[in-house]
Image (spheres, rainbow, N blue to C red):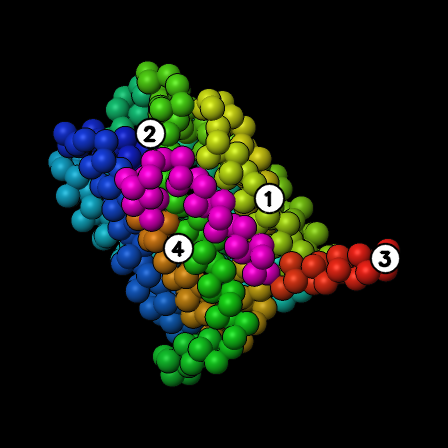
Amino acid sequence: MSAFLPFLPLYVRHLGHLTLAQAQWWGGLVIAAPFLTALVAAPLWGMIADRFGRKLVLVRAAFGLGLTVFLMGLAPTVEALFLLRLLQGALSGFVAATAGFVAAETPPQRVGYAFGLLQSASATGSVVGPLLGGVISDMFGMRWTFFLVGLLCSGVGALVWSSIRESRKSGGYSLPGWAPFRYIARSSAMLAMLGFIVIAQAALLMPAPVFPLYLERLSAPKELLSTVTGFSVGITGMVMALVSPLWARVAEVRGRGWVLFLCTLAAAGLYAVQALAPHYTVVVLARSLLGAAIAGILPTLYALLAAHAPESFRSSVMGVGSSAMLLGNLLGPLAGSAVAGLWGMRWVFATAAVLMAALSVLNPQARLLARQLVWLSSQRR
């Protein structure tokens, strides 16, 4: 999927004769579109997974992605691309189904580590995807990237169907459909974690609509703009793939609160560096370091969510968690486009830095650290 996502703003500009402001706005709409429909669909697919089995939902999601992405390569206009992205959100849900599958099939004490490995798997794909997509886009045209991704997603569906087995505890969910939502509404801890997921994901996706345009403004070579964009996104994924399991082990030793605090604080600083960057090479370097920071955010939040979810409707809870992530994916690009239009592209990165800093401050671990610092200060006096 990451083979085409970083280049969507360029594809939008390719499909229509748009001004810079129009390209930024349509780029935000196209990136956010599937998250709008998936926001509603993800909990429904989660409940279906609990009732009928998670493997079935995984296969359906993979083929749904394959079909819609392939059709995006045939889109004649920006409006058609937007409608196909809406359809993608309704038919996909692969990430939510995977998270529910991993949470259900993993021993509770190892869920955090399992999500770290899952993050590494996704990050490894995000390394290969943008690099491959950038090269194909520059050599053959952007439409061929969509064709390739569509075929790969369909191949994933066939692979899951033929090789993945689920245990007997998957499926057979018989509680009322509203039971997971009532459980979440009554848990302040789960509501807080869902809020953290929304804010973190919104901050991560805010630069997406303007990122290649920002690199172009910071003197990135125009004839290699897709390749530079793909490398910038790919290096982030490579670092994430290497660091995610390490953060999971740190969380097992020091606690997930510490990992969340350190990662959000580091991400805030690195977004600030990108906002102030004088040249595109500084952005590329900061993006690579950002991969180490964000590698510990979402896996930690998902592990906390799974730890608080009853086994009987864990996929439903993880589906709600996925909806929280999708809401962040929806709000992030739209906010990024709006901020860029009002104040300029640098302020997009600055706003992402503020959001990450807010997560660090709101983390209970930050309050514990503040109390410890106050105590040490009083002891020295």
Q: Quadrant of the N terminus?
A: top left
In this view of the protein, which residue sits in the foreground, 343 or 281?
343
Write the start and end of the magenta stretch as one range.
335-363
Specify the farthest residue to the front. 381
Q: Nearer the viewer, mark 4 or mark 1?
A: 1
- Residue at the image position 33 percent from the left and 18 percent from the top: 222
In this view of the protein, which residue sits in the foreground, 293 or 371?
371
Q: Which residue is mark 2?
A: 213
- Sequence-earlier tag: 1 or 2: 2
- Sequence-earlier tag: 4 or 3: 4
Q: How many marks?
A: 4
Dot 2 alpha-carbon crowd within 10 angstroms: few under 14, some 14 to 19, many 20 or more: some
| CA–CA distance in space, label 3 to label 1 | 31 Å
Q: Nearer the viewer, mark 2 or mark 3?
A: 3
Q: Which residue is mark 3?
A: 381
- Residue at the image position 41 percent from the left and 76 percent from the top: 181
Q: Nearer the viewer, mark 3 or mark 1?
A: 3
Residue type, mark 4 in image: Gly
Q: Residue 328 — which label?
A: 4
In which quarter of the view is residue 131 placed? top left
Q: Residue 34 — which label?
A: none
Dot 4 alpha-carbon crowd within 10 angstroms: few under 14, some 14 to 19, many 20 or more: many
- Sequence-earlier tag: 4 or 2: 2
Q: Which residue is mark 1?
A: 266
- Sequence-earlier tag: 3 or 1: 1
Q: Quadrant of the C terminus?
A: bottom right
x and y percentages locating residue 324 in the rendered image: 41, 61
Is residue 24 in the magenta section?
A: no
| CA–CA distance in space, label 4 to label 3 | 45 Å
